[in-house]
Image (cartoon, rainbow, N blue to C red):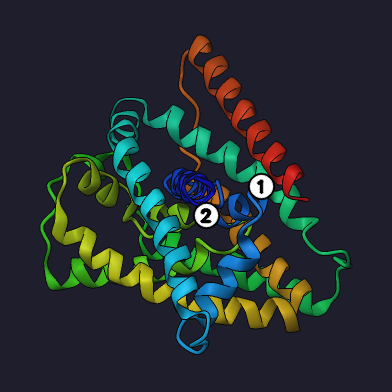
Amino acid sequence: MMNLKRDILLLLKGGAIGVANIIPGVSGGTIAVVLGIYKYLIEAISNIASDREKRKEYIIFLVKIALGAVIVIFLTAKLMKFLLENYNIYTNLAFVGLIAGSIPSIYKSHSDMKIDLPTVLSFLVGAGIILFFEFAFPHAEKKEGIDVAFYLTFNSGLMLLIAGFFAGGSMIVPGISGSFIMVLMGQYYIITSSVADRLITPLIVVGIGIVIGVILFAKLINFLLNKFPKQTFYFILGLVTASLYSIYPGLPTEMLQIIIAVSITALCFAVSYVIGFKER
């Protein structure tokens, strides 16, 4: 009975991480920290290939987390697609609030966040990456993109694979959302629609990228957070701060709509801030 409870609890925790990873601005890594499984999650991903004694234990743990995440993602994808198609400005402003609310949490993630030249450079590199995607792909996340039929070609498949790689890596970083990496690379609407419409091929392609990204980034992040924690968190701050410019959709034109939009943004900011506060 105790094992069953633990299994159900792990599935629910995986589901919570899954919900976080389909909402740009909410960090799956942050949720893992809040739920008390982040350290073991990084350990399992980083050592699953090298630690033969605990490999089976790691695999069972990761399968339960992944299963819970996948189930919840499929259950909520249609809702996200509906919101993006019918309430695009409000939905994107909600994303803005969620992302902005995570910034204080990232800044306080390390005890020594004193500004110096290395931290400034780290911040600028992180911001530069996001702005590069914004200017290199200026129509990546416009409203019209969601209504266009998606055809899997070599180029579109390669973009999905690359986006999956970086999104997979960012999913395990507290304070940064894998799904907003998808937004920034113009693939979020494609993946949301594919999940909602049960289009398997694009999901397989992006899934391969995510798995590779999670494994490689887990090792890299583990190393960077241990060796250069302050610079790494400033790099993440640069990513998150610049993303606000990238996804800001503007405000509606009518006063009532503006009030609703501002209220949604403020509410989502508060939710994200509280999650980050609990993490700290």
Q: Residue at x 67, y 80 (%)?
A: 224
Task: Tell me the kind of residue under disc 1.
Answer: Ser
Q: Position of residue 275 (x, y in %)?
A: 67, 41
Q: Position of residue 59 (x, y in %)?
A: 42, 71
Task: Tell me the kind of residue under disc 2.
Answer: Ser
Q: Residue at x 60, y 76 (%)?
A: 221
Which residue in the rendered view is the most extreme toward the front? 1
With respect to residue 76, does 115 lie above or below? below
Q: Position of residue 151 (x, y in %)?
A: 10, 57
Label 2 sits on residue: 177
In this view of the protein, which residue sits in the foreground, 43 or 237? 43
Secondary element type, mark 1 = helix
Q: Are marks 2 and 1 in contact (CB under 8 Å)?
A: yes
Secondary element type, mark 2 = loop
With respect to residue 221, does 18 lie above or below? above
Label 1 sits on residue: 102
Is residue 167 visible from the viewing direction of this image? Answer: no
The dot on residue 182 is none
